[in-house]
Image (cartoon, rainbow, N blue to C red):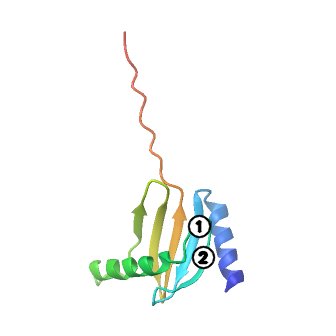
Amino acid sequence: MDTTFGEGFNKISSSESDIIGLICADSNGLCIKKQGEDVSSSDAGYLASIARRAQILSSAQDSRPPVILIEGEKKQILVQNQGQLTVGIYKKPFVQQTPQIIQQE
């Protein structure tokens, strides 16, 4: 799994430069693998729980599990259940540029 996980992380992070980490948890919320400086093993249980709760809240007729976005000042985390696993993708925060106000004389 280490090779597959590492290859997957490299593939994802090379396609999007704002990805800073990845975590994978089992159905019990135990961290299977993590990669990235800002990723903690203790996040796995929380993310798995959030993904399960979101799936309960979403429509039972949805064919895909919901994607959850957690936004913070230092990072964003995208979370989704994938079968028996929960996957979290850590990204740099979205920085919205405020428009410059041009003052007229």
Q: Are marks 2 and 1 in contact (CB under 8 Å)?
A: yes
| Rendered location of residue 101, percent (x, y) | 39, 25
Residue placed farthest to the right in the image?
Answer: 3
Q: How many marks?
A: 2
| SS at badge 2 | strand
In the displayed structure image, the side of residue 93 where residue 2 appears, left or right: right
Kind of residue sitting beneath label 1: Gly
| Rendered location of residue 94, percent (x, y) | 47, 52
Q: Which residue is labeled 1 in the image?
A: 21
Per the rendering, the mark at residue 34 is 2
Kind of residue sitting beneath label 2: Lys
| Rendered location of residue 90, percent (x, y) | 53, 65
| SS at badge 1 | strand
> Relative to 70, does residue 92 appear above or below in the rendering?
above
Marks 2 and 1 sit apart, C-alpha to C-alpha, by 7 Å
Earlier-in-chain disc, 2 versus 1:
1
- Residue drawn where x is 37% and y is 83% of the image: 52
Work out whether residue 17 or residue 49 is closer to the camera in this orientation and state it: 49
Question: Dot 1: few (<14), some (14–19), or many (≥20) neighbours within 10 Å?
Answer: many
| Rendered location of residue 11, percent (x, y) | 67, 69
Quarter the N terminus occupies: bottom right
Residue placed farthest to the top in the image?
Answer: 105
In the displayed structure image, the side of residue 59 where residue 90 appears, left or right: right
Quarter the C terminus occupies: top left
> Relative to 74, does residue 3 appear above or below in the rendering?
below
Question: Dot 2: few (<14), some (14–19), or many (≥20) neighbours within 10 Å?
Answer: many
